[in-house]
Image (tube, helix red, strand yellow):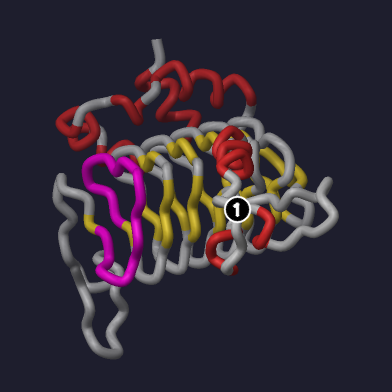
């Protein structure tokens, strides 16, 4: 795990190379979660009951729970995915009604509340970019190729390849026309093996989305 006094800790700034084994910063906590190949989790993060697909990263100070995240995810610093709801129908919103043992009360913790939260999973597609300090609320689905602006609060589903901003998040525009977006989803380059991606790396750098779709589409 990388800790270097006063120096940025992300592997790209320091010119380091990730490996097939997930790299999880020593200051972060991960519970009951699965990380794919070439994944990175930055400092001071908490991840619970979630999946981060191959090549995905979360830069640090992230809180992620009950989330299914596709491949090539780009999650900036401070992003929170699926913050827990409280039981608003009860007489009090406080933890003591379901984390009862923590407060010295006689009843066991209320498993039903935690099961309720776990059912409200977030689903995030492939190649999604979530900007700094954005919040993705419980039960939301974000489509493949979408971008979420910094500080946005996503309360509704986001279509594939949409750019959403604001509080609550709204569609600002789409990254490309609908036909190109559909062709990219058919190509599904995120499912290519490493050799295929490496062979096309020059095109990823040089071609527009339209040109890429035209070259690799059927």
- Residues drawn in magenta: 24-40
Q: Residue 66: give x, y in percent of width and height.
A: 50, 42
Let me know if residue 169 is in the magenta part: no
Q: Is 50 or 129 nearer to us in this picture?
A: 50
Residue bearing the label numbered 1: 107
Q: Residue at x 29, y 55 (%)?
A: 40
Q: Is 53 or 175 nearer to us in this picture?
A: 53
Residue furthest front as drawn: 106
Q: Residue at x 57, y 37 (%)?
A: 115
Q: Quadrant of the C terminus?
A: top left
Q: Residue 92: give x, y in percent of width and height.
A: 80, 59
Q: Quadrant of the N terminus?
A: bottom left
Q: Is residue 3 left or right of residue 111?
A: left
* Residue 161 visible at all: no
Q: Is residue 54 left or right of residue 2?
A: right
Q: Residue 141: give x, y in percent of width and height.
A: 61, 34
* Residue 30 visible at all: yes
- Residue 180 appears in which quarter of the rendering? top right
């Amino acid at each position: 795990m990388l800790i270097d006094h006063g120096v940025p800790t992300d592997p790209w700034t320091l010119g380091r190379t990730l490996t097939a084994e997930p790299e999880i910063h020593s200051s972060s906590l991960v519970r009951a979660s699965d990380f794919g190949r070439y994944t990175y989790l930055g400092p001071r993060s908490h991840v619970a009951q979630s999946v981060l697909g191959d090549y995905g990263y979360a830069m640090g100070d992230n809180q992620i729970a009950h989330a299914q995240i596709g491949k090539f995810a780009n999650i900036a610093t401070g992003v929170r995915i699926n913050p827990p709801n409280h039981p608003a129908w009860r007489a009090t919103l406080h933890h003591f009604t379901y984390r009862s043992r923590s407060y010295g009360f006689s009843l066991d913790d209320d498993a039903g509340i935690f099961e309720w939260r776990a059912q409200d999973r977030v689903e995030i597609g492939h190649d999604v970019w979530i900007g700094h300090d954005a919040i993705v609320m419980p039960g939301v689905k974000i489509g493949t190729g979408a971008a979420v602006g910094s500080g946005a609060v996503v309360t509704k589903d986001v279509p594939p390849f949409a750019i959403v901003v604001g509080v609550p998040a709204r569609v600002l525009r789409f990254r490309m026309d609908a036909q190109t977006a559909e062709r990219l989803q058919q190509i599904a380059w995120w499912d290519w093996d490493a050799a295929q991606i490496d062979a096309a790396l020059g095109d990823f750098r040089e071609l527009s989305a339209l040109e890429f779709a035209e070259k690799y589409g059927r």
